[in-house]
Image: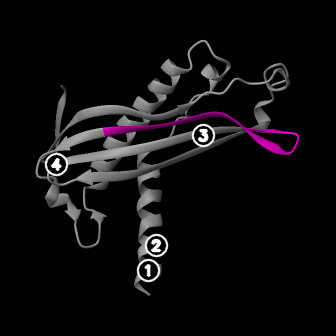
Amino acid sequence: MAQKTSNTIHYQINRIEELEIHVPFLPDEITDHFDRDRLDFGFSFDYVWDLEENLFSVVIEVVYLYVLDNEQEELLRFSGQIEYKITDLVKFIDIRQKEIKLPEEILGILTGIAISTIRGMIATRTFGKFQGDLYIPILNPMKVVNQYLKNNASEEEVINQ
């Protein structure tokens, strides 16, 4: 297994897991007259951890919807988890605040690896199907992480008021 060291933080991929996949059969009405302008992409992710085992995971969900006759038709739903083993993880998690204290650079690396891995998993599972052309767009993992941290900080402010 590949192991990386960055800023004295040792981490490696521990497990890659598909949590859910839904690739429905699509009616001819969609496949014969497909219009990318009617396509909607949804992406969400979160972090989970197990301090006893030094495990830190990035959980990602991807959804593609298609607007047809003013209704949304689900074309693809996929969720997966990339689990990392991080030495002394407890140093990087504030247990009382349930807050991640890993450097943003490391979160960006771990999140980027997870996004790319999920992209490949979707491509593999949809190969030969109509949905095989639906890829996760290229995302800047640092922007994704910064937005996540900003949103969580805003939520904490509301809770603490």
For the residue pair 34 and 129, the one nearer the viewer reads as 129
* Residue drawn at (25%, 56%) of the image: 102
Q: Which residue is label 4 attached to?
A: 54
Q: CA distance from mark 3 to mark 2?
A: 24 Å
The reply to whether discs 4 and 3 touch (Cβ–Cβ < 8 Å) is no
What's the amino acid at mark 2? Glu
Tell me which label, 3 or 1, sits earlier in the chain.
3
Q: Quadrant of the C terminus?
A: bottom left
Q: Amino acid at mark 1?
A: Ile
Against 34, residue 138 (above or below) is: below
Residue type (three-letter) at the residue carrying disc 4: Asn
Q: Work out which residue is located at the far bottom of the displayed protein and give it.
A: 161
Which region is colored magenta?
Answer: 66-82
- Give me the C-alpha separation between circle 2 and circle 1: 6 Å
Residue 34's label in the rendered image is none
Provide the residue designation for mark 2: 155
Compare residues 102 and 15 and report the one nearer the observer.
15
User: Which type of secondary structure does the marked residue at label 1 adopt?
Assistant: helix
Q: Residues at badges 2 and 1 in contact (C-beta under 8 Å)?
A: yes
Left or right placement of residue 160 versus residue 34 in this view: left
What secondary structure is marked by label 4?
loop
Q: Quadrant of the N terminus?
A: top left
Residue picked out by circle 1: 159
Q: Nearer the viewer, residue 130 or 136?
A: 130
What residue sits right under mark 3 in the picture?
Answer: 63
